[in-house]
Image: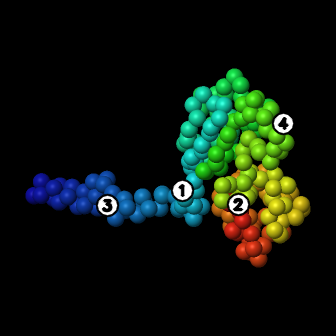
Amino acid sequence: MKRVFILLLLLFSISLTGCGETSYLEKTTAARESEPEKKESDTEEKETVDEIYVQIEGAVVNPGVYKLSADSRVFTLIEKAGGLKKDAASSEINQAELLTDGQKITILTKKDLKDRDKAGDTAASVTEASSENGKVDINRADPSQLTTISGIGPSKAEAIIAYREEHGPFRKTEDITKVSGIGDATYQKIKDKITV
């Protein structure tokens, strides 16, 4: 009889403590509570562009299209392209310039630079701000190029450049409305004349 009583007591105590095991429901509840909440900003970060493609040609060892991180600068692209050739007009290159997706960089030779200066072609530059379709690239244009856009005066051109320097390149043309003094009405007037 003692054995039966001890056995029953042992079974009773095991059933109360659960043998130290945690139930499935307790495990899943604890796991959910310990997981950090996903914020909207976490999903937005994944949607941002992490890589860009940029073309480089001219006086570099290996011209071509290169994949770079989105925060890359011209000097990084030059390094990827094997460096500058000996005859590159390095004084004309802004190696600290932030690159944008789809950008094309042309590195002039010293001879090209002299020929350009002789011809008086001051509009040509190492990085062209006007694309082939005649639109002004708001990420690379200088103040004089920006003022060629109807509705953009000198003060708005300076505001665009200041915004670019503080926040980085525009990801899409609509982002120009984030610049102080440029609203939706202005954007609607200039959207067909600008590009990024």
* Residue receiving disc 1: 46
Given the current orientation, which residue lies at the most extreme top position? 86
Earlier residue among tags 1 and 2? 1
Q: CA distance from mark 4 to mark 1?
A: 49 Å
Image quadrant of residue 187?
A: bottom right
Residue sitting farthest toward the left: 1
Q: Mark 2 or mark 3, which has the lower sequence index?
A: 3
Amino acid on which disc 3 is placed:
Ser
Indicate the position of residue 123 as horizontal and vertical percent values: 80, 48
* Disc 1 element: helix
Q: Residue at 80% x, 64% y: name it.
A: 149
Circle 2 residue: 135
Q: Label 1 amino acid?
A: Lys
What label does residue 23 carry, if any?
A: 3
Q: Quadrant of residue 54?
A: top right
Question: Split into 4 quadrants, where in the image is the C terminus?
Answer: bottom right
Q: Quadrant of the N terminus?
A: bottom left
Q: Considering the numbered disc 3 on the image, is that residue within a helix, a strand or a loop?
A: loop
